[in-house]
Amino acid sequence: MPNILEVKELVKKYGDFTAVKGVSFNIEEGEIFSLLGPNGAGKTTAISMLSTLYTPTSGDATIGGHSVTKDPMSVRNIIGVVPQDLALYEDLTARENLIFWGQMYNLNGKSLNTRVDEVLAQIGLTDKAKNRVKTFSGGMKRRVNIGVGLLHKPKLLFMDEPTVGIDPQSRRAILDTVKDLNKQGMTVLYTTHYMEEAEELSNRVGIIDHGRMIALGTQKELTQQVGQSETLILHLEEGANPEALAKSFNGIKGVDNADASDHAVTIICPEAEDVLAAVVSKANEQGVKIRSIDIREPNLEAVFLHLTGRALRD
Amino acid sequence: MLKTFLIGLKDLRLAFRDRAALLLMLLAPFLLTIGMGFVTGRFSGGTSGISDIPVILVNQDNAQLGNALVDLFNAPELADLMEPTASSDLETARQLIDNDETAAVVFIPKGFTESIIPKDGQTLSDEIISIEIYTNPTRPTSAGIVQTIVEEFLSRVESGSIGGQVTMAQLITSGRVAPQDIPAVGEAMSERLSSSTTEPVTAIKLKQNEVGGEAIQFDVLAYLAPGMALMFLMYTVSYGGRTIIAERIQGTLPRLLISPTSAAQILGGKIFGIYLTGVAQLGILIFATTMMFQLKWGNTLGVIVLVLAAVFGATGWGMLITALARTAGQVASVGSAIMLIFGILGGSFVSLENLHPLMQNLSKITPNAWGLDGFTTLALGGGLADISTPVSALLLMGAVLFIAAVLLFNRQGIAQR
Ligand SMILES: Nc1ncnc2c1ncn2[C@@H]1O[C@H](COP(=O)(O)OP(=O)(O)OP(=O)(O)O)[C@@H](O)[C@H]1O
Ligand SMILES: [Mg+2]
């Protein structure tokens, strides 16, 4: 498949601070590509440049063969954007919002109306179309926010953390919508800091941290980088000192790496069962109470931990 | 072009869905107009936007009715509104108009009372002797008010003769017409009215010094209503400016910028939205005051042209404030300050005639002063040609401010976060 998006050495500085430090990657037509990274990694900044909102400090990207810096208008016609923060008129109804944004994408007349009806059905808000957006729940607003990005049937859809801060049910619905859209032929660039979402949705994943792309490939390729390691997560009671505990774990035979975060210690090891007993008794020695234990097969979280020494989320 | 229009319509719709905005755009000016209308009582005294109108009373009648009119001008209820001076010589008094030292001269000729209430044993003269009002053309509003007071007085004299003398009694409590004379006055008046076959009795003759000779019909509401409407028009344009910054923060402006819509179309649409909202606001206020108070705004075409020009000038200010401000809060506070300052400078509270000359010059930067000038001219019977100066001034003001604002916006980029 040809590349729909090619990013070359993209850099963005905000004053002295460099938010994106030379990122390069390609997206093939028809795939779902996830950009996975913690808060502040530079995901939104990258999407803002690709969607022609911000001018890159240096570097460039082409979308469908058009440069985002030299020919932004052509780019705008083929991309759809679902911004991280809701961007809707709360005093307009769901339908009025979709009609207005459709007009801004040069749709009009009967075809606009039909398309709006289709999108309303797709985001499951046909019944609520005549209600003002401000009366909606967070999940419903998010769905309208997504709907706006779909109106003109973009070839490439950018979705910036579309599931942040909503209930599991709405989240499920959104993930299913993304998969549906992709089945219908839409290429998607999806950013998230939820490893599970990247795992479920994407063909390929780029892991971004502190403005750098630290890993890029299919999930399989990435997990192979950390070998066959498993991840063992100990969730601790309030008041425990995870740093001290993690330090003491690093001496245990069979532990590759132990890392502390709030109320938890994450351990990377070839075989979790082999170290479990030693780890628990170490904790008991220090009088630390363990609330629960998680064992995970090799995953993107482990990749991130392996590459950065930090957990992806708190 | 089409998108500019669509963005403008969207903003108009949003403004009319915002309760707080509606309150200030429509309800506040409407209620204040009514309130100030009551205070001036459509003239029973108190403070109005206009106060201390200098008027010279030349009373050569020196009889009951003439004295009653002089007393009316000196009544405590009118103390704030009028500043009457007595004079015995008409020529000297008219000279003061030419020197712009007074707004009007009311001349009560000798024999005025007698021509209405004959002395015992005398028959009525054939003609009612008219009161004459000489007005200062540079102070149309004040002169209009003087005239209205005289008309009010005369209509009370008349109604005292027709209806049960209630108003008559009211009027005369402070006046010189002795209670025992009232029936006589009434009788005389009704006789007069029934005998007059051609025209209704008018005991007033209007004379304008120098310019023009047409009769002035002025309702004080025709000054108050546009004054308030123009003041709250400044609210509307700063509200509109605020939505530009609000859209930046709520993410809809960035979203517009990444749609296939140019920055010029977006900015144009936002400006058009402010303009539409302002025109709708003035249109509704004009319609409502016309319907509810039978307020005559004057020549329809003139009113339309003036509304379009005034909103254009005001929108220019709204854009400039927005281009200079960094936050929506700044636009709101600067906008409110400007609304009040322009309201005062522009004559919404105090007639420009009463302001220091320096302030009068300064008032030329406000759309309020020019707009009010135009609206009073129209209400006093002027036509399109008579408002060409305020209309051109407003258009020029708008054009200059627009250019300044657009340059500022270009330098910052409207998407700047
Ligand atoms: N306008 C700006 N001015 C200065 N710094 C900024 C600006 N926007 C973002 N940053 C900084 O750039 C870095 C990257 O921010 P960005 O929003 O791209 O991260 P992100 O990966 O989208 O994070 P999140 O998951 O929280 O959305 C952060 O450190 C942020 O503080
Ligand atoms: Mg982000």
Image (cartoon, rainbow, N blue to C red):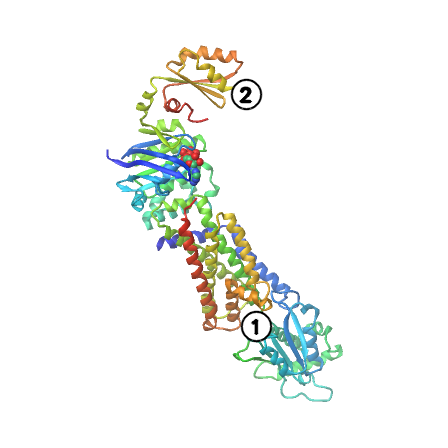
Category of crowding for the residue at label 1, using alpha-carbon neighbours closer than 10 angstroms: few (below 14), some (14–19), many (at least 20): some
| Placement of the N terminus of chain B among the 4 image quadrants | bottom left
> Quadrant of the rendered structure where residue A196 is?
top left
Residue A239, numbered circle: 2
Q: Mark 1: which amino acid?
A: Arg
| Residue A163 visible in the current orientation | no
Residue occupying image coordinates x 53% and y 61%? B229
Residue B321, horizontal then vertical, whole percent: 48, 54
Q: Secondary structure at mark 2?
A: loop
> Quadrant of the rendered structure where residue A275 is?
top left
In the image, the residue with mark 1 has its CB under 8 Å from the nearest atom of ligand 1: no
Q: Judge whether B407 appears above or below B135 on screen.
A: above
Residue B54, horizontal then vertical, whole percent: 63, 73
Q: Mark 2: which amino acid?
A: Gly
A164 on left or right of B333: left
B342 on left or right of A115: right
